[in-house]
Image: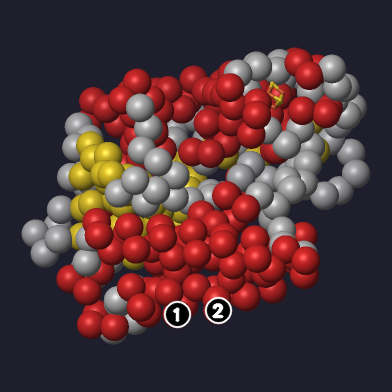
Amino acid sequence: MDEPQLELADDAGPVDVRMSLSPSRAGDFQNCPLLFRFRVIDRLPQPADPVMVRGTLVHAVLEDLFAEAADGRTLDRAVELLPTEWEQLREAEPRLAELFTAEQAADETAWLASCVELLGTYFGMEDPRYLEPASREERVSYEVASGLTLAGIVDRIDIAPDGRIRVVDYKTGRSPDPRYEDKALFQMKFYALVIWRTRGVIPTLLQLMYLADGSFLTYEPQEQDLLATERKLIALWDAIAQAIEQRDFPARKSGLCRWCAHQDICPEWGGTPPEMPLLQIVPVEAVA
Ligand code: SF4
């Protein structure tokens, strides 16, 4: 799920960059520092993308499904929630109107049908009538000793009667090739680290659910894993701080470029980035 971003002040003068990392922004910098800059520093708008919006919509349905009484959490109910959630999303984000024009009603119908398919796969993976999540879409955050805040939004946290914690994240794509599982688990270890540091309990299980192919990716984190994740995030922030100080966010061309909305202003694709504003790093609490 989407997470809080490094946020910038709107005032003229140097742009304040909050000393904060979410899993997605950490991933952006690791994949391509220039993409990180476009998203976090320049805050360039992202065109509405049907695949990403489908993920947001399915997440919203699954979140609200758990607000129903247990025996009402059925696939039929989830499908019923879909149009309402879609309407609410469009009201909250007017740019989503550009996704399907009146002439593209058939595309929208097919797109909604693909959401139903994902929900159907979800119900084949677990039965929500027998689950009582401790929280859904929970914001978690923790400040490490250096002043860096780690923050994110966890899709679901389940807590067993004996106190064991399971962290669940829904993915509307397919499960990764085993070579990329570590990358997929990075986000989950990030959440596990924050939960451990704020609650004093290491989650027993991290569970990614891939609704496009009905696969689970699970991991039982150990203290050493989480300490290593913390060190990695601190080192990553140091690299970001250095990039800010040197005003240097190099482009890193890769297969991910085909999903990037900024090829036209990327030097790797013959474009020119906008001029970078002056930047200053500030602790999270320093920005209202
Ligand atoms: S097109 Fe590729 S190299 Fe350029 S900013 Fe996007 S991800 Fe980075």
- Res 80 label: 1
Residue 154: horizontal and vertical position, in percent?
Answer: 40, 53
Question: Viewer-nearest of labels 1 and 2?
Answer: 1
Residue 83: horizontal and vertical position, in percent?
Answer: 55, 76
Residue sitting at 53 percent across and 50 percent down? Answer: 2
Q: Is residue 161 left or right of residue 14?
A: left
Disc 2 crowd rating (10 Å Cα; few below 14, some 14-19, many 20+) is: few
Q: Is mark 1 within 8 Å of ligand 1?
A: no
Residue designated by label 2: 84
Residue sitting at 76 percent across and 32 percent down? Answer: 262
Residue sitting at 59 percent across and 31 percent down? Answer: 28
Specify the farthest residue to the left: 162
* Amino acid identity at mark 2: Thr
Which quarter of the figure has residue 130? bottom left
Image vertical order of residue 106 relative to residue 198, above or below = below
Image vertical order of residue 238 relative to residue 15, above or below = above
